[in-house]
């Protein structure tokens, strides 16, 4: 496995690759969810490039950019064991040499201004911009993203479609702990008591899904009830929502599949999760 920190070096390695190339973008502090992306890329592609970059443009001034866990040595060891060929681990100056103030940005407003975008203004512009740069630099045939951040996945898919990028975006199912909690680097912020409580988010999403499968179509009430249950348990709820899985709008008669999404704070950790409910909404 080769580790490069400069764009020039990444391009040189990419030009030397033969066969299909898979890209796994990460911010490091890797867990089994990240490694599931690598495994999928390894299964589908002849070459695998992973990136480790804590992207400052997707953090608001009051968020945890400075304290976000950085574990480069451990991450590189895990990526090598997983069979990655090249790791691109640049610093901020390499990615944004002219600084943030003069940075050209990518925006997908139809999808980015709702749900987590409403709670974190500008977050998804930062995500779309850095992913666009990484897709341009690595020129992968396929890029792999976890379904845990469903809104992020939808935004990246829309960006690639709208800008006619050649990369296929592959969503990989969420990896969960035994009690249902979606794996996340921010889970380590949880205290033992908070960690015991955290899987309630997944259980509430399952309750909503089960109600939908039973035929319930008052989505607003289902979401409000789940939100209230989480708040009563001690979460600070940003949202619980039932949305069109692709357009992230309120479901209507054209909706072929649903996504049930939630975001809530528990102590220092902001937790997000979602599950699908492939049930057509009757006209």
Image (cartoon, helix red, strand yellow):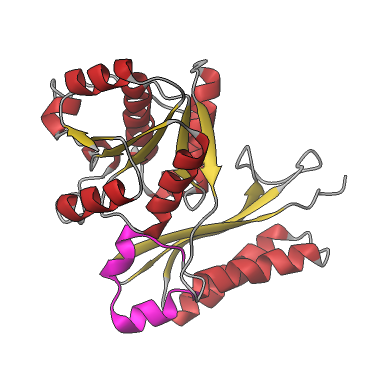
Q: Which picture quadrant has residue 211?
A: bottom right
Taking depth in this image into account, of 122 and 135 the one nearest to the observer is 135
Residue located 20% across and 46% down the image = 61
Q: Is residue 143 magenta?
A: no
Q: Main secondary structure of the magenta part?
A: helix
Which quadrant of the figure contains the C terminus? Answer: top right
Rendered view: 232 above or below 81: below
Which quadrant of the figure contains the N terminus? Answer: top left
Taking depth in this image into account, of 44 and 206 the one nearest to the observer is 44
Query: Outermost residue, right direction?
Result: 283
- The image shows residue 208 at horizontal and vertical percentages of 67, 66
Taking depth in this image into account, of 124 and 54 the one nearest to the observer is 54
In the rendered structure, the answer to whether residue 46 lies left or right of residue 186 reads: right
Query: Magenta part of the protein: which range?
Result: 182-199
Taking depth in this image into account, of 64 and 173 the one nearest to the observer is 173
- The image shows residue 265 at horizontal and vertical percentages of 37, 66
């Amino acid at each position: 496995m080769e580790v490069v920190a400069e764009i020039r070096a990444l391009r040189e390695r990419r030009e030397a690759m033969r066969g299909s190339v898979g890209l796994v973008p990460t911010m490091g502090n890797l867990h089994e969810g990240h490694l599931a992306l690598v495994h999928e890329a390894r299964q589908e592609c002849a070459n695998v490039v992973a990136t480790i970059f804590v992207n400052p443009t997707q953090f608001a001034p009051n968020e945890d950019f400075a304290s976000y866990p950085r574990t480069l040595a451990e991450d590189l060891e895990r990526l090598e064991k997983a069979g990655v060929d090249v790791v691109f681990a640049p610093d901020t100056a390499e990615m944004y040499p002219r600084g943030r103030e003069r940075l050209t940005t990518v925006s997908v407003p139809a999808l980015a201004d709702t749900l987590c975008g409403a709670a974190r203004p500008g977050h998804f512009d930062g995500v779309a911009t850095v992913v666009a740069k990484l897709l341009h630099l690595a020129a992968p045939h396929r890029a792999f993203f976890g379904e845990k951040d469903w809104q992020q996945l939808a935004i990246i898919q829309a960006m690639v479609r709208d800008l006619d990028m050649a990369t296929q975006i592959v969503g990989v199912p969420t990896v969960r702990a035994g009690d249902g909690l979606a794996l996340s680097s921010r889970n380590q912020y949880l205290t033992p008591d908070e960690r015991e409580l955290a899987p309630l988010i997944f259980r509430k999403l399952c309750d909503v899904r089960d109600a939908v499968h039973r035929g319930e179509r008052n989505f607003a009430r289902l979401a409000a009830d789940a939100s209230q249950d989480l708040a009563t348990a001690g979460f600070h709820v940003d949202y619980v929502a039932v949305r069109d899985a692709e357009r992230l709008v309120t479901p209507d008669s054209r909706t072929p599949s649903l996504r049930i999404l939630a975001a809530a704070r528990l102590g220092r950790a902001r937790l997000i999760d979602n599950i699908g409910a492939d049930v057509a909404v009757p006209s």
